[in-house]
Image: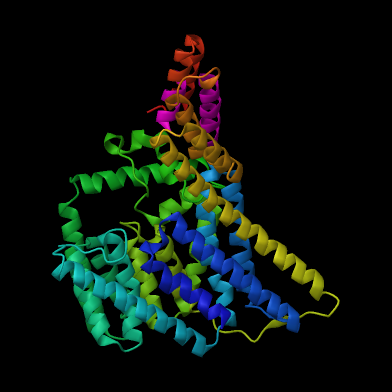
Amino acid sequence: MILPALVSLLVAGGPLMRGAWDLWAQSLIHLAVVAGLTAWLLARIAVGYVPLPENRTLVWTGLLAALSAASAWASPVPGLARPQWFVFLAGLWLFPAMAALSKDERTGIDQMIRAAAWVLMVLAFYEHFKLHVERPTSALLNQNVYAGAVLMLLPLALERGDWLLGLGLFWSLWWTRSVGAWLGLAGALAITQRRASPLWSRAGMAVVLICGVVLYGKLETPEVLHRWGWWRAAWAMAVDRPLTGYGPGAFAYVLSAYRRLSPFGLYSLYAHQYLLETAAGFGLPFALLWFGGLWRGLMRGGNYKRFAVIAVLIHSLWDYPLSIPALFWLFCYCSASAIPDSPRGVNLPSSYRPVAAVLVAALGLAFGGNVWSLWAAQRAALRAQESVEAGRFEDARREVERARRLNPLDPESALLAAQIELKAPAQAGSRLAAAAALEEAVELNPYRPATWTQLAGVYRMMGQDALASRTAERGQRLLAP
């Protein structure tokens, strides 16, 4: 029962925790998954039998794990890319895990997702009718993210014959006014029903045409112009670093170096285009392998979950639902559902079991320790900020140093250390310490313009005008418009 519980935590619990967008939610889920998966593997090793998926799935997930690790560690902002790498791994392990889940266990997971869908739908109705929110967000970040969740939850509700839930989700989808979501729903209907129900397929095509007309009418609006700029920037990132990309989730941090491609230099956390954002973050070899494997799964998947995957992929060409961790995990579950349960496995001789158990435990401790360190570092940084606001600068220094020890690759902690030195009462060497911290911050994240400006300003306060000018020039060369 361990595996079904872990999968349910990801795909049913995650959406109820604001889509696991916050680091605390991600960390809790990751720690539970790492601990549970380690315990399950140790139990299988103890009995001497470990189930395995088919070789093709095993090789595919192994290559993806290796390519994503290379992308995260080769990133120019590794401290910012590493948490998003953990998010990807949390979804990737679902593919080999599906081979160990029986039909009844999968049914149980679907029921947990259905329960989560009821909670999300009821919250949306409560917001709309009780709180008078015109475009409800439910438990998620915004209405567009909720629309992406509905695209995957609606087919699962219909698969289980819960027509009342399906009607409620469909009704709440209308409130989101997400043209991309309706395009995804109609496009999936047109694609999946071509042979089974030509009438429904034609209806889907009609809605696709209507959505196309609506989007055409928005071509000159800021909504479209901004997306066009972000897509161009994401493509330029993929071209500049085709092998490894800039790292998982690095788009938001690197965008400042490509702001010439974005109208008015507007920033965004996401590229609003999952294909391009994947290529920019992970590199082209990873993107080809990832989408090629997903395509193969679509060709043999069941009708309802296949519908969900196609619908959200079409939606992700316009918006960012798959950039939200919990929605990405739900997407991975729907994609992996095409993998049949496998009778394959490996029998471990008694002499190999202690070695295998030690390796699994060490791997679990390594991943769990990294996740805990990232979370503990963020908590320490928050305590440091609170201490600064209260004027307790020595406490702030201790907390920020603890954050830097726990996560030495985090540029935000180095930046906070510099701010503490600049805000605290002047002491001998405080400006020098601030400059050193800012130098570390620009090394760990060279794409933040404000850090370069602040570093040059500190050098000017120290009377180092020539060094300040060279620092400003370094930043301008890197972030040239």
Residue 76 falls in which quadrant of the image?
top right
**Residue 246 visible in the shown view:** no
Q: Depth check: 336 or 129 in front? A: 129
What residue span does the magenta drawing correspond to? 431-456
Residue 432 x, y percent position in the rendering: 54, 20
Residue ID at (41%, 27%): 480
Residue 372 falls in which quadrant of the image?
bottom right
Is residue 142 placed above or below 197 in the rendered structure?
above
Residue 364 x, y percent position in the rendering: 66, 64
Q: Is 220 within the magenta?
A: no
> What is the residue that sits farthest to the right in this orientation?
351
Residue ID at (51%, 31%): 442
In the rendered picture of this protein, how many numbered marks are placed on residues?
Answer: 0
Q: Depth check: 453 or 61 in front? A: 453
Residue ID at (45%, 81%): 109
Q: What quarter of the picture does the N terminus occupy?
A: bottom right
Residue 63 x, y percent position in the rendering: 62, 61
